[in-house]
Every structure is written in structure tokens, then in C-alpha cells.
Image (cartoon, rainbow, N blue to C red):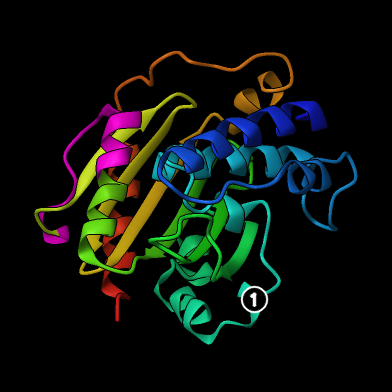
Amino acid sequence: MASAAACRQELARVGSAVGDLGGVPPSPRSISDNCVEDTAPGTSSASIGRRASTAFVALAVGALVALAVVPSSAGASSSSAKALTHDLLPSSYANGVGFTEVAMTATSSSKTGVTSCPLGAEAAFDDESNQTGVVSEVLECRNKAAAAKILSGVVTETSASSSPPRRLGSSAIERSSSGPIYTICWRRGTVVELVALETKLSSSTSSSSTTTTTAPAPPITADQQMVLSAAALKQDSRFS
């Protein structure tokens, strides 16, 4: 189980990346308040720490960290942000492909921490054995240039993986990072969409309390690629 100290260390690292993009990283008080041993019903502290890491790797610059780990009460009442949850992978789909455990219910915010991309939504699901998880994220930016910058940040902070489905368009990229985590990101106008497949959850969670894993991810397997690509296409079909 990830410790509160490990959680705080991870969020501090993510917050620094958010600041590099010109966003507003979580405050030390917010980090402290959200990195405690006591957790909400149905959510383990290991899950909280792991999702912080996933959000960082997934969008590279931590655009949705404020949403995923430090929710904004103001954002919860934003109808525009709430509308983005429709574009996420639905729990019915996740359940149908083996991700039967809800690690994070669909959450939206109008304060993602990145000024140029203020609206976001995220959901996460794990398989029954807690070995593999899928993360679904949507980030709405003020303009196409801001959305493109998010994708550029992903490329900078991650490694090349396989090729994303062509149906996602020319902006689509597929990247990998330690964890291992495999991510497909693409842009639809001013909206950045993302689906990430996180593997070896139990081992990565148990090791996070003592050290940070920086080893490169192994090549994605054919089965993993099939799951990741299908999930990305499903999410893209929901774009409105």
C-alpha cells in the first residue's frame, strides 16, 4: 500500500510539471490534505497514489492531477465540465471487457490546474485481480494551440510505443512510460482525449512506498494493444 509520504512526493513532482506548463499546481496544503492514510469508502490509499502517477504520465504535464487527486468543489458545479463526462469510457463498456472494478467514478472539474485547458474529466477502472487498469480522460482547452501543446508535452515526457488506430486521426500518438503504462492520446479540435492502460498494478503500488520506478516500459503485447486500441476507439466514438 502506498504511504502518505510517497503520495506527497508524487504529487509534488506532478505539481512541478504543471507549473512548467504555466498552470497552477496543487498547493502544499492541498497535497497534504489529499495524501493521508485514511481514505474514502471504497478507495484505497494505494489507488489514490497510483492514479496520481497515472494522470501525470497520461498527460505528461499533469493537466488533470488537480481533477484526479485534488478535486475542485467549484468545478463540481460546472455544467460545461460535467458535459465532458459523457465522452469518457462508460462503466458498462469497461465491465464488458474485464475491468469490473471502479477505481475512480467519472469525475469532472473546471479547475484542472492548466489555465489554457481549464475543463477536464476522468474515470478509471481495474480488473478483478487488480493487475491491470484502464484510465479514460478528456481535457478541453481554450484553443487548438493549447491542445496541441498538451500532446507535445506527452511526447516530451514519455517514450514511443506502438502505432495508434488510424481512425483517431493524424494527431493521435501512442506512448509508453514506466509502470508500465501505455497511453493513446489524440485531439478533436480543442479537446484532448486519452486512454491509458496501466499494467502490473499490484507490484507498482507496493514498490511506490520505497522507491520510484524509472525503468523503461517493455514493448506492449499484442493482447494489451488490442485492449488499448479498442478502448480508445470506443471513447472516440462518444465524442460530441
Q: Is residue 109 above or below residue 133?
A: below
Magenta segment, which residues? 152-168
Indicate the quadrant where residue 202 lies. Answer: top right
Secondary structure of the residue carrying tag 1 is helix
Viewer-side residue, 135 vs 79: 79
Residue 194 x, y percent position in the rendering: 36, 54
Local packing at callout 1 (Cα closer than 10 Å; few below 14, some 14-19, many 20+) is some
Whether residue 163 appears in magenta in the rendering, the answer is yes
Would you name the residue on which mark 1 appears? 76
Residue drawn at 80 percent across, 56 percent down: 42
Residue drawn at 44 percent across, 66 percent down: 89
Residue drawn at 28 percent across, 58 percent down: 147
Viewer-side residue, 17 vs 133: 17
Query: Is any atom of residue 158 visible in this view?
Result: no
Residue 130 x, y percent position in the rendering: 63, 40
Indicate the quadrant where residue 109 lies. Answer: bottom right
Whether residue 198 appears in magenta in the rendering, the answer is no
Q: Is residue 161 above or below residue 132?
A: above
Q: Amino acid at mark 1?
A: Ala
Residue 32 x, y percent position in the rendering: 81, 41
Q: Residue furthest bottom?
A: 79
